Image (cartoon, rainbow, N blue to C red):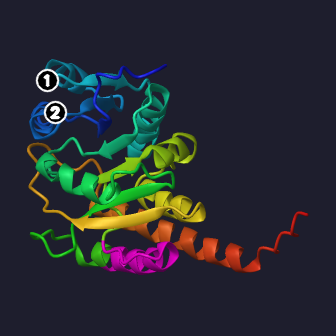
Amino acid sequence: MARSAERPDVLVVIPALNEADSVGAVVKETRAALDADILVVDDHSTDGTAAVAAAAGADVISNVFNLGVGGAMRVGFRYAARHGYPIVVQVDADGQHDPREIPALLAALQPTAEPALEPRLVIGARFAGTGSFSVPRARRWAMKLLAAYLSRLTGTHLTDVTSGFRAYNRATVELFARTYPAEYLSDTVESLVIASRVGAHVAQVPVSMRARLAGAPSQSTWRAVTYLVRVGLMLVLEVIRTRTRPEQPEVK
């Protein structure tokens, strides 16, 4: 389906699970911050998230089952690819991401006037010198290890590989519409592994985090740490596979 020439180039995708108390404000702030279409992917909420998002002016897709953030984002990428959006920005529904910082992500995503044909993505980094953002010590330690490994893998110094505040160009949108991982937290980390495999350009810009507008995180600290450890093991296995994978014969 072709996108109308009058529509904005940017689609902001907001995955949301039971965020009725905050998603409306996030949609309104985003609309005030930049000229963009807004899609809320309601991940089978039970509290009226979809109705609040629609009333605030967003387009809404409601998942029949709970798919997690990664699954919700894959829905968003497929929607963007189907409708021809050249840029997708991912924003959380809890209000911790400041939509006024989206232009900084977009400037780093496409630094020249010429559209980039290579996959590109930009991470809004919480640990890059702007503001303060605290996490439990065990989780912070695991995140540092992941950041160190993925910095080597992508060839870019990264400090916050689990941030869900990101911008993607068309090539990356089309890639992730097919391949974006769905597991909690591994979506952000494993997506960088996928991007590195195709030679994507990865960058980060410093952003400030705010307190949640309402509610509480849907995942416990212990579960988050458990998943970070699991993702770390996945990355170790990826290194082993890469080192032991036989070279492919040259095609003549």
Percent of width and height locating residue 28:
10, 32
Looking at the picture, tell me which residue is in the foreground, 240 or 173. 173
Residue in the image at 25% along x and 65% along y: 205
| Gap between marks 2 and 1 measured at Cα | 6 Å
- Mark 2 crowd level (few <14, some 14–19, many ≥20, 10 Å Cα): many
The kind of secondary structure element at disc 2 is helix
Looking at the picture, tell me which residue is in the foreground, 113 or 194. 113
Q: Magenta residues, as a range?
A: 141-159
Q: Is residue 47 visible?
A: no
Residue in the image at 50% along x and 60% along y: 190
Q: Which residue is mark 1?
A: 56
Q: Which residue is mark 2?
A: 27
Please state which amino acid type lies under the numbered disc 1.
Ala
From this view, report whether residue 238 is shown above or below residue 167. below
Query: Magenta region's main secondary structure?
Result: helix
* In the displayed structure image, the side of residue 159 where residue 96 appears, left or right: left
Please state which amino acid type lies under the numbered disc 2.
Val
